[in-house]
Amino acid sequence: MSEIQLQQLVKQYDDVTAVQGMDLEVRDGEFLVLVGPSGCGKSTTLRMIAGLEDITDGTLRIGDSVVNNVPPKDRSIAMVFQNYALYPHMTAAKNMKFGMKSVSDFSTAEIDERVQEAAETLDITDLLDRKPKELSGGERQRVAIGRALVREPEVFLLDEPLSNLDAKLRVQMRAELLKLHRELATTTIYVTHDQTEAMTLGDRVAVMDDGELQQVAPPQELYDYPTNRFVAGFIGEPSMNVFPVTARRQNGRTVADHGGFTVTLPDGDGLDGLEGSEVDFGVRPEDITLAENLPDSAETFRAEVTVREPLGELLLLHCRVGDDELQVKVEPRSQIQPGDTIELGFNRERLHLFEATSGDALYHSTPQETPSEAIATE
């Protein structure tokens, strides 16, 4: 069993707290992604799990054992770094073998066999005699992953392993990592600042900000039911539109009044007692529609187009509504131009309200039927 449990884990550097009381459980065989902006504490968390950083406070368990003071070589983990960390004077095969004798009882023949098997899995058999300078970035990363594979660890730790690759190769390597995880089912923690990587790779995604865990959930749940304004803005590209509004009652219903638009909110949990409150209204760019595609009875509003971004599969429009900017995804071949005034409406099944000060989610217009077992907030 290779579950990982972090209980009130803290990392302090002098007067700076990099990780603040983190509670997290990674399930046996799970691919969990730690995501957040630069400096949020995600790599520090990974390094504490690896044993490369001392734990200031709290408890770290791998399986049934507390490993706070266990040396890295005795934790049955393997780590893949952002910069590959390959020895330039060694061939790929020797890089993959390096250190195996010190962390295992395998014979030379067994180690050679493991290297060959890992190379076949990663399709790098013909690269084993080459040195790192003779390899492309993607090939070096495969060698680094192969070095982790030969150890057959209970846990894989990957620290932004694709960030040095070009966009096309990152997509390819994401697919290969997913395939590899399906085959091996090794407990994996993957750190990235790229929310697209997080959404495509993770069985669950743990979002961090400023040393604190904000939410842990499957990718679609994060996207549809963010626990606070930070998660709502961080997950999704482009990010969720968020505006200050006043909640008020109108004809027996709760409405969000922005000034530039007014939208009637579907009845649901979280609306009681909001009348007269200043809150933040959230809606994703794909949940805003041109009025021409809505029924005649739909609530609509007008917006001025300021920027047009053709993205191939869609057209992203930047618009002004009152004093706020709004991003809208529309059909890619639309002829809408900057300076045009367009009429829009919201998908009323995908609306959100957040508390103005704390940013905590107050309301989602579509109720969450099966909440995740692992929502974590401060």
Image (cartoon, rainbow, N blue to C red):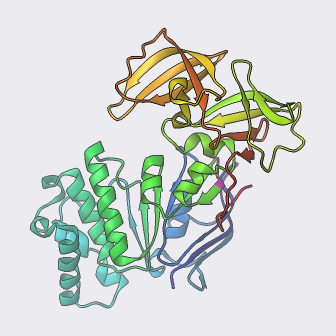
Q: Quadrant of the C terminus?
A: bottom right
Q: Residue at x 54, y 44 (%)?
A: 37
Residue 147 occupies which quadrant of the picture? Answer: bottom left
**Residue 35, x across and y down, in percent:** 52, 52
**Residue 362 makes an appearance in the image:** yes
Q: Nearer the viewer, residue 211 or 16?
A: 211
Q: Is residue 213 magenta?
A: yes
Horizontal side, residue 301 vs residue 166: left or right = right
Q: Nearer the viewer, residue 49 or 359?
A: 359
Q: Above or below — where is 232 with respect to 180?
A: above
Q: Is residue 10 magenta?
A: no
Q: Residue at x 52, y 56 (%)?
A: 219
Q: Residue at x 32, y 47 (%)?
A: 164
Image mark count: 0
Horizontal side, residue 121 vs residue 238: left or right = left
Q: Residue at x 54, y 19 (%)?
A: 319
Residue 118 occupies which quadrant of the picture? Answer: bottom left
**Residue 24, x across and y down, in percent:** 63, 67
**Residue 106, x across and y down, in percent:** 28, 90
Q: Which residues are magenta?
A: 210-214
Horizontal side, residue 67 vs residue 247: left or right = left
Q: Above or below — where is 107 with respect to 58?
A: below
Q: Nearer the viewer, residue 92 or 348?
A: 348
Horizontal side, residue 355 vs residue 106: left or right = right
Dominant secondary structure (helix, strand or loop) of the stretch shown in magenta: strand
Q: Residue furthest top?
A: 339
**Residue 51 makes an appearance in the image:** no
**Residue 196, x across and y down, in percent:** 44, 48
